[in-house]
Image: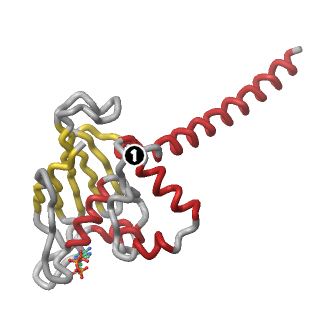
Amino acid sequence: MRFSRLRLTGFKSFVDPTDLLIQDGLTGVVGPNGCGKSNLLEALRWVMGENRPTAMRGGGMEDVIFAGAASRPARNFAEVALSLDNSERLAPAGFNETDALEITRRITRDVGSAYRVNGKEVRARDVQMLFADAATGSHSPALVRQGQISELINAKPKSRRRVLEDAAGIGGLYQRRHEAELKLKNTEANLTRVDDVVEGLA
Ligand code: ATP
């Protein structure tokens, strides 16, 4: 699936709605220091479900909302929309009915985040799995933060293995295994309870 457009509204320094068209081939973003290049990459990671404020260079998730400037008041919400070209129908099951997908995340002060796919409200997990199954996502090794190369060089083998697994597109399987294990534990607990009830009746 190819990213085709990123739209930011009230996200960090992008107070006014801003569209970034991502066309075929290589896209370069150039500009003076502090103009918002890293904010664009963070917006991409954020809409894919990043939940660590530190990964957004903030103390809390609401720090991504435009905080105001000398001539402009702070905003009450931030929104990022990412459009994906799905004409080859590579999206995971459940999201594969249309040629294009628009994933939107909005955060409102004191309310929190909400996600939508093509206008329909979904859970954060659905968006995270959509990208994990497509071998990308907020932790994708394709998104290289400042300082990440030296972090990788100094990383422990287990963390490096995680990078390779994400690149191979099996990151989503870990989440699914974890959820299956939780279900299994619940079922075992229920069975024990049933045994107790049966014993009580005997
Ligand atoms: P460099 O080339 O130095 O790495 P950059 O182009 O990557 O810079 P960013 O780090 O993306 O720039 O942008 C930093 C700018 O974003 C700063 O001017 C900062 O004040 C602004 N900024 C960050 N968060 C917010 C916010 N919540 N509200 C308003 N402005 C913000």
Residue at horizontal 16 percent and vertical 76 percent from the top: 73
Residue at horizontal 48 percent and vertical 50 percent from the top: 165
- Residue 56 at x, y percent in the picture: 35, 69
* 137 and 69: which is toward the camera: 137
* 89 and 126: which is toward the camera: 89
Q: Quadrant of residue 47?
A: bottom left
* Vertical side of 19 occupied by 154: above or below: below
- Residue 140 at x, y percent in the picture: 38, 56
Q: How many marks?
A: 1
Q: Which scheme is used to colour this image of the protein?
A: secondary structure
197 to the left or right of 144: right
- Residue 74 at x, y percent in the picture: 20, 73
* 77 and 104: which is toward the camera: 104
* Vertical side of 4 occupied by 91: above or below: above
Residue at numbered disc 1: 132
Residue at horizontal 22 percent and vertical 57 percent from the top: 79
The amino acid pointed to by label 1 is Ala
* Vertical side of 177 occupied by 31: above or below: below
Question: Helix, strand, or loop for circle 1?
Answer: helix
- Residue 155 at x, y percent in the picture: 53, 69
Please tell me how crowded label 1 is: few (under 14), some (14-19), or many (20+) other residues with Cα within 10 Å: many
143 to the left or right of 170: left
